[in-house]
Amino acid sequence: MKKLLIAAFAAQALLFTACGDDSSSGGISMSMSGSITVDEANQLLVLIPDAYSEAGCVLEGETPVWKSVVHLQKPDSFKYEFRGDTLLLHEVDGEYVYDGRMFVGGKAGNLYASWRYTSCRYDEEDAETQCSEKDARYYELVYKLSPGRVNAKAVYYYDKYLADEGTASYMDSYFMYQLYGKLSVAYGQDVYIDEITYNKPEIVQGAIVNYGVQVLERNDKGGKFTIGEKTYTVRVNKVEERLVTTEHDGTEEMEINIEVSDGVTTCVAEYLRLMPQKNLCKAENMDYLKFETEYDGNGLPYQYAYRFRMENENAFNSCLYDISAGKQLDGFTPLYKKAEEPRRDSESDTFRMYRKMLKYANN
């Protein structure tokens, strides 16, 4: 079940509910089982998550209704291979096969063992290993594969994520990279409000240089800068994140309020993301409820609300266009044309991997 969350891999880890709390480390432990089939000839592993029943917001006709349904999740396919004693699992999405995620703990040639995810992947094209220190810090994942069954255990260190995020400056966020571009080039890329929590100091510094930004003041929650002949201020009034879980589900909720001003006009960014609860499952909230197709216990499709989101990004970007200094700047190639970086789904293959794999740790 898809969840749009904040930190890398949080989208996947929050598909669980805590079955135990590791008080010594602050980690939330989760475990569950599913079934597997193995095609050894084609080195194909198919994981089938167990169905579960839970109340949620579903569409009946065009009306959202709160009711209990059986969630029957789709099987997931992975090509597998061994490199020494390391197991590589390649997510298969249609005809596309992703880089192999690296697991250790078993022996070469034998799938049936306990495998620990290393937070690393093997890049087939470049023949090199790439690892994520952040993923290793925030998540642990072990799969015990046996004939016909998979048992999963995961730990999510949400407290470490929040603590690390608290030390980062919002002025080093991907939001600021986008903001500098928008204010420098009126027709530049849009600014996404929730990117205020995505720390990218190196690309922000690049934007400062390439857009001719002069930073006059800065602190962790705002600052003042000039672009061309104009002076701007940014004030981050509110960024709140919280973990909310149900028996079989979970998400990180977020509330944001930011002000950007040129001294005459103030552009206000507002963003609210919530787990759909019974009180939100109403016809008047249809514009804010986000649905996707799920399958019930009979294999029949239905529309399930996985997120409630209310934001004013279109109006905010329109306001930024109005106060942009872009028409005053000439003689350089906009940074967004030089080194455009996707939004947080630049690691979407990682997101997909965890979304598919960790749903077997539903509890």
Image (cartoon, rainbow, N blue to C red):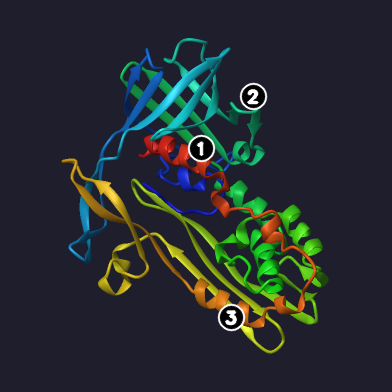
Answer with mark 2 or mark 1, whichever residue precedes in sequence: 2
In-front residue for pair 146/291:
291
Q: Is residue 38 left or right of residue 79?
A: left
Q: Is residue 293 left or right of residue 323?
A: left
- The residue under label 3 is 319
In-front residue for pair 236/213:
213
Spot occupied by residue 79 in the image (x, y as percentages of width and height): 44, 24
Numbered tag placed on residue 155 in the rendering: 1
Amino acid tagged 2: Ala
Spot occupied by residue 211 in the image (x, y as percentages of width and height): 77, 66
Viewer-nearest of discs 3 and 1: 3
Numbered tag placed on residue 357 in the rendering: none
In-front residue for pair 243/353:
353
Q: Residue at x 71, y 78 (%)?
A: 327
In the picture as drawn, the residue positioned furthest to the front comes out as 331
Amino acid tagged 3: Cys
User: Which structural element holds mark 2?
Assistant: loop
User: Which structural element holds mark 3?
Assistant: helix
Q: Residue at x 78, y 72 (%)?
A: 330
Contact, CB < 8 Å: mark 3 with mark 2? no
Numbered tag placed on residue 127 in the rendering: 2
Spot occupied by residue 189 in the image (x, y as percentages of width and height): 61, 65
User: Could you give the CA–CA distance between mark 3 and mark 1, rounded to whole angstroms?
Assistant: 42 Å
Q: Is residue 337 left or right of residue 53?
A: right
Amino acid tagged 1: Val
